[in-house]
């Protein structure tokens, strides 16, 4: 009996160690990691359903919301003659001609040469960026993009600006991010030979509802009313109806990313026209959201108010943005629980900016805490960062340091948190 017990005492730890080593072998880890994450998530969400959580802003200066007409900005088109592209090496933009009549579009178009990849676990952003880059002859795959975009594989999201940074730092190509896209803009880029990365809402793939997703749009067919997309989850060359794309795209302010060789920049700017200038684009997307607000209801109305807030945030109208986000959060409780986009702050962090810069620090803290607490594991560097900023503003230095460090645990080398700790004279 003693020998049997002794054998168990030796074999059980060895078996556990072997299981851990085996799980971390790349071929096995790639196949099992998403299952482990799914089981953990199922348990957490069954005990504490995230769709039931409702964030209620408390620091509003006034409950009186002006009429929509007062909220609607009058777009001012900024001359693109002196504007510059964002990025490490800004270059002058060619003049746009707002009144120029675009050439008629063909009834269909399709770009070939994209190497499709099914995404690895939690790897939508890196996979779609790799697919888009493959069109331009880039030699690499989603593991190469993920090494830059997601130093922590458990990171729940890759931001568009992170994808832009990878393109411009590591590929010799350029990337541009714009909002307020529409079918004509998508089609004109495709016809001109530029696939388009879009960020959109995504549903019907698992037990726990709405989430964000990237896709590469590389074709369209007016006779069938469909786009052709490369989808890292569902497969290559999928038809997506115009209506379905428009509805899902709204969730991300109709955001799109164009990757292009530097020598073709003039073509990109010509297609964008006045929206080659980022300020004009934010004004345009704010107006688009305002126009939609009067026509929509339910979850779509929530997205429209949120989109308006995001565009105003980029215009640094933080008061107007905060007001728009307040309206979005006021709509949220009326959305049926199973349809609620409770992951929204995983992907779009505009409310943190807006509330922080109008000194609504408690709202920043409450929103970040609600977002982190309702995750299967708290792993959003942006939420930790903004909660730390608000805590520091309220004099809670120890809380701020803890959150900045938590942000760096999630995303090693995350610049904003490193900068805050350095300013405070604290080691990461």
Image: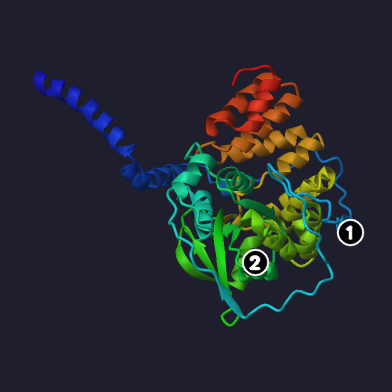
Residue 241 seen in this snapshot: yes
Q: Secondary structure at mark 2?
A: helix
Q: Which colour assignment does the render follow? A: rainbow
Task: Please name whichever residue, 368 or 59, is drawn nearer the observer in this view of the structure.
Answer: 368
Residue that mark 1 sits on: 74
Question: Is 20 situated above or below 302?
Answer: above
Q: Is residue 49 left or right of residue 53?
A: left
Residue found at x 58% / y 75%: 109
Residue at 24% across / 26% down in the picture? 13
Q: Position of residue 197 (x, y in %)?
A: 59, 58
Going by the image, does 141 lie left or right of 380? Answer: left
Q: Quadrant of the N terminus?
A: top left
Q: Residues within 10 Å of mark 1 (few under 14, many from 20)?
A: few
Contact flag, marks 2 and 1 (Cβ < 8 Å)? no
Q: Is residue 419 above or below residue 312?
A: above
Give the foreground label among 2 and 1: 2
What SS does tag 1 mark?
loop
Tell me if residue 221 can be seen: no
Which quadrant holds residue 277? bottom right
In the rendering, at what x and y percent does residue 179 appear? 71, 57
Circle 2 packing at 10 Å, graded few (<14), some (14-19), many (20+), is: many
Give whichever of 17, 296 is nearer the camera: 17
* Image side of residue 140 versus residue 420, left or right: left
What is the residue that sits farthest to the front in this orientation?
263
Which quadrant, please, contains the C terminus?
A: top right
In the picture of the structure, the residue carrying the numbered disc 2 is: 189
Q: Position of residue 69 (x, y in %)?
A: 89, 60
Q: Where is 404 relative to 118, above or below?
A: above
């Amino acid at each position: 009996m003693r020998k049997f017990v002794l054998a168990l005492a030796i074999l059980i730890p060895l078996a556990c160690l072997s299981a851990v080593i085996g799980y971390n072998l790349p071929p096995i880890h790639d196949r099992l990691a998403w299952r482990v994450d799914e089981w953990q998530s199922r348990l957490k969400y069954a005990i504490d359903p995230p769709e039931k959580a409702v964030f209620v802003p408390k620091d509003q200066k006034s409950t009186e919301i002006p009429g929509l007409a007062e909220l609607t900005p009058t777009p001012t088109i900024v001359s693109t003659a002196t504007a510059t592209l964002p990025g490490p090496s800004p270059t002058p933009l060619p003049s746009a001609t707002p009144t120029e009549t675009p050439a008629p579009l063909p009834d269909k178009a399709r770009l070939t040469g994209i190497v499709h990849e099914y995404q690895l676990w939690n790897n939508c952003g890196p996979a779609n960026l790799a697919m888009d880059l493959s069109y331009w002859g880039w030699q690499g795959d989603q593991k190469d993009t993920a090494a830059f975009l997601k130093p922590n594989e458990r990171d729940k999201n890759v931001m568009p600006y992170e994808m832009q940074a990878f393109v411009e730092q590591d590929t010799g190509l350029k990337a541009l991010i714009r909002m307020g896209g529409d079918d004509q803009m998508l089609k004109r880029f495709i016809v001109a030979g530029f696939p388009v990365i879009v960020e959109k809402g995504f549903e019907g793939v698992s037990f726990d509802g709405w989430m964000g997703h990237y896709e590469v749009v590389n074709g369209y067919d007016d006779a069938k009313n469909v786009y052709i997309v490369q989808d890292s989850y569902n497969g290559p060359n999928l038809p997506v109806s115009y209506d379905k794309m428009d509805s899902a795209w709204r969730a991300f302010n109709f955001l799109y990313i164009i990757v292009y060789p530097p020598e073709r920049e003039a073509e990109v700017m010509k297609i964008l026209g006045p929206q080659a200038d980022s300020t004009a684009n934010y004004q345009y997307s704010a107006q688009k959201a305002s126009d939609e607000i009067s026509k929509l209801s339910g979850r779509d109305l929530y997205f429209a108010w949120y989109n308006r807030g995001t565009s105003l945030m980029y215009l640094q109208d933080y008061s107007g943005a905060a007001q728009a986000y307040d309206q979005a959060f006021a709509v949220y409780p009326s959305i049926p629980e199973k349809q609620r986009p409770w992951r929204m702050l995983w992907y779009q962090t505009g409310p943190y900016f807006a509330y922080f810069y109008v000194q609504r620090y408690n709202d920043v803290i409450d929103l970040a805490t609600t977002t982190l607490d309702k995750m299967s594991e708290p792993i959003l560097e942006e939420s930790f960062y903004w909660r730390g900023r608000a805590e520091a503003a309220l004099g809670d230095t120890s809380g701020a340091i803890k959150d900045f460090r938590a942000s760096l645990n999630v995303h090693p080398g995350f610049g904003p948190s490193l900068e805050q700790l350095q300013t405070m004279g604290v080691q990461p």
